[in-house]
Amino acid sequence: MNSNLKKGLCVLSFLTAGFSLFGQSTESDYLIKMDVDKIGPTIQPTMYGVFFEDINFGADGGLYAELIKNRSFEFEYPFTGWTPFGDVSIRSDKPCFDRNPLYARLINRKQLTGTGLINEGFKGIGIKTNEKYDLSFYARTLKNETMKLKIEMVSDKNDIIESKEVSINSKPWNKYMITFAPMQTCSKSSIRITMLTTGVLDIEHISLFPQETFNNRSNGLRKDLAMALKDLKPGVFRFPGGCIVEGTDLSTRYQWKNTIGPVENRPININRWNYTFSHKKFPDYYQSYGLGFYEYFVLSEDIGAEPLPVLNCGLSCQYENIDPNQNCPVDKLEPYIEDALDLIEFANGPITSTWGKIRADMGHPAPFNLKMIAIGNEQWGTLYTERLEPFVKAIRAKYPNIKIIGSSGPQAEGKDFDFLWPEMKRIGVDLVDEHYYRSPEWFLSNANRYDSYDRNGPKVFAGEYACHAPDKENSFLTALSEAAFMTGLERNADVVHLCTYAPLFAHKEAWQWRPDLIWFDNLSFVKTPNYYVQQLFGNNAGTHVLALTKNGKAVSGQQNLYATAASDATDNTLIIKIANTGIDQKKISFILEGLKAGIHAVTLTHLNSSDLNAKNSFETPDLITPKVVHSEINDNKMDIALPPLSFTILRIAR
Ligand code: AHR
């Protein structure tokens, strides 16, 4: 063995405490073969992607950089997020925005308390010194007079961080803006607005954004969180969910047309994760749709991912709403189908088309080049198939090149799954969405799941998956199980064309569902070991599968090894991904048949931990991170000592 390589690996090789799932292997030597010239199936550039849903305050309070909660006073209880003081009422006469008509009227009669409003943000307002923040609002006076407002950033200790004054001198609604440059960092500040002059003032859509957003877009996204997405190198971007697509009833379903146009006039919607789990209620959880479909398409472009919208199929959540009369009758699906066709036009239509023009008016005349669309989220039964069919017919007729994705239901096997797959073939969708939130054991034993799938049917979109282990959410155990499983996805890249871990984001103080890929608070975030697994796959996807065998068989669980290999035509490298779920170091000899004689540079990237229960946390965010070792091999033989409990990427220059 090359001494450098050995040295690098030895540093990372150590025995660990036992864990029943990953048994001690008896073999000490392993020979794995790979034929570097036998180019196999294409790995789709869309293979590894991201799933986004506004769950766990992932959009409002998360990726969407707006810092004011309930900026338009439109929540069911209009003062949610606000503490009014003095004389403050909510009105809707002569509104500023017809689709978000509520606003606040402030009356100052020199009450001792003063009159004004305090906004608490999303579990506080996170602000950083050295950053600037734009606060904007719409206001009007009732008489021809100048009214003065004091606007303060207040710390969680009730100290004033910064104070500004604004004069309001317009009877018609008018927009005002001021900029804060706080001299301190505070994760839980608030905004206090106080009337300085006596009289009456109406105020609406009070908004606070950091000036610096991802790619410096207005109405933008939190830079750190969006960068974390980009760093995954996602090939595909599923949006907006998830159950949120369905709504608890159809009136609360996700309607993309409500999410475009000026943000001030996008009608808000209750978020279903507000009340879905009775043990985790968040009455202050609504969707502002500030991160709407336009922002989604722009973000997809910015992070280099193909957009994959999921649309409602005329069914509300089948778990929550079991009354079939609550669903849209099949003969009344027209508006739902039209929504799907219009979305394609919004994304791809010329600027002379109705929806293409709206896209252009919003700032993106060029088409977004949408290539696929999913109809229905976790749907099942004939309720679903009889609705899906007319969608497929209409989309095929108008947009024959758009790929259509159907659902196989919420479970990865069983009655509904067995009904739906043949139905998806009959209906002729291009891909079938499978979901699995399962145990580590399930992930390991399903690493060969796709080996026996029909090669001639629809392709697979592993559209929502995550390894669930109670009390061990986002532990190294779950990440390693996912890595082992994902080698099976890639090995079957002729069948599996897309996969997206779910959910993506979770606010540390406001989550409903875990595990999640990225945890955040108001100022920082933590990448889970699961994130690093996704990142390692995404950044090392390769372009074609290569056969990798041990004793003539794919490496899928023998002696706790799971592996796949690829070539990357873009930089002429070979890529091996290998998970060792055993607690023993594995000495492996790779024979890379066909690799030319001479020296080849090798980069090894390891993700490992001696503790399967270990997690990254806000206190120790870098406990488990990939470590890179550079080395080289001679000719076509590569001997490595694979650390116990590890996931390794080997990148070999040809
Ligand atoms: O990812 C969380 C939820 O899990 C999704 O909203 C839903 O599709 C699935 O049940």
Image (cartoon, rainbow, N blue to C red):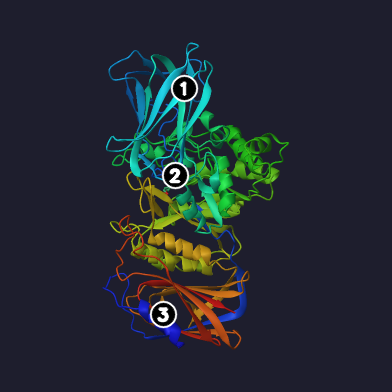
| Label 3 lies in ligand 1 vicinity (Cβ under 8 Å) | no
Q: Give how far across and how far down residue 474 sits, in percent.
A: 35, 58
Answer with left or right where residue 388 lies relative to residue 208.
right
Answer with left or right where residue 255 lies relative to residue 522.
right
Residue 411 or 241: which is nearer the viewer?
A: 241
Marks 2 and 1: CB-CB under 8 Å?
no
| Residue bearing mark 1 | 167
| Residue bearing mark 3 | 8
Which of labels 2 and 3 is toward the front? 2
Question: Up-down: is 356 above or below 446?
Answer: above
Question: Up-down: is 393 above or below 571?
Answer: above
Please tell me which residue is depicted at 56% across the width and 82% down the height of the picture: 600
| Residue bearing mark 2 | 131
Packing grade of label 2 (10 A; few <14, some 14-19, many >=20) is some
Residue type at numbered disc 1: Ser
Q: CA distance from mark 2 to mark 1?
A: 24 Å
Among numbered discs 2 and 1, the one appearing first in the sequence: 2
Residue type at numbered disc 2: Glu
Q: Quadrant of the C terminus?
A: bottom right
Q: Give how far across and how far down residue 6 sits, in percent.
A: 42, 84
Residue 98 or 602: which is nearer the viewer?
A: 602
* Secondary structure state at the residue bearing disc 1: strand
Q: Quadrant of the N terminus?
A: bottom left
Residue 592 or 135: which is nearer the viewer?
A: 135
Q: CA distance from mark 2 to mark 3?
A: 41 Å
